[in-house]
Image (spheres, rainbow, N blue to C red):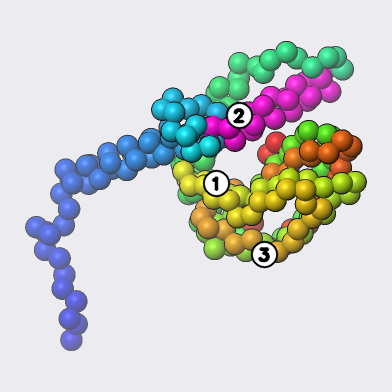
Amino acid sequence: MYNTDIPTRAELPTSAQLLRSTVIAILAAAAILVTIVLPAEYAIDPTGIGRMMGLAEMGQIKAQLAEEAEKDRAAGQQGAAPVAAPTPGRRSGLLDRIFAELLIGPAAAQTAPARRSDEMSITLKPGEGAEVKMVMIQGAKVNFSWTVAGGVVNYDLHGDGGGQETSYQKGRGVPGADGLLEASFDGKHGWFWRNRGTSDVTVTLRTSGSYTEIKRAL
């Protein structure tokens, strides 16, 4: 004998209720996009909330570094001086990234990835910053270690995705770090380093664990 009660038709949600729930979810996602994602990722802060929360400053740094990287790539391809400004396509690329972050990314990250190991080295000039991100699902774990040759760096180990953001660790003037990173949610998780010294440094990162992709974001 089963004690589970089967809901009647009257107890099931109506089409109007489902539509209302969908509209509320869309409005909530739009609010998160405008107040958190745009300021933190692209320095776009129409409401001013991102500036009060300190997210706009982080977005400005990322946008500046992205523009500098684009200039360097253009100069390397053309063999000429860096271009003066980013191309108009940056806006469409921004919208594509927002769409991927909020819609495609979370849906594609539901399957647990196989374990993998990677190693990469990044050289930073004085004042230069770089970011490396891994695509991870909630609860996935990665063992990591990174070292700095030639000096020390400031760093922030953080994650973002689906309108969520978190900072796992931060440090100033650090020669390296190691540990276990466990993703708090589906998204991109990794490190931002900046060289505040007066000479070039090289950051060597080693990772091993459950993630589908690792690449330099900035």
Horizontal relation, residue 211 to residue 73: left or right = left
Question: In which quadrant of the rendered image does the C terminus lie?
Answer: top right
| Vertical relation: 69 (above or below) 135 | above
Identify which amino acid the numbered label 2 is placed on: Gln
* Cβ–Cβ under 8 Å for marks 1 and 2: no
Mark 2 lies on residue? 60
Question: In which quadrant of the rendered image does the N terminus lie?
Answer: bottom left
Mark 1 lies on residue? 160
Sequence-first disc among 3 and 2? 2
- The segment highlighted magenta reads 55-78
Labelled disc at residue 150: none
Mark 3 lies on residue? 180
At a point 64% along the width and 61% down the height, the residue shown is 181
Sequence-first disc among 1 and 2? 2
Q: Position of residue 142 (x, y in %)?
A: 67, 62
Q: Secondary structure at mark 1?
A: strand
At a point 56% along the width and 22% down the height, the residue shown is 91
Q: From this viewpoint, is residue 69 visible?
A: yes
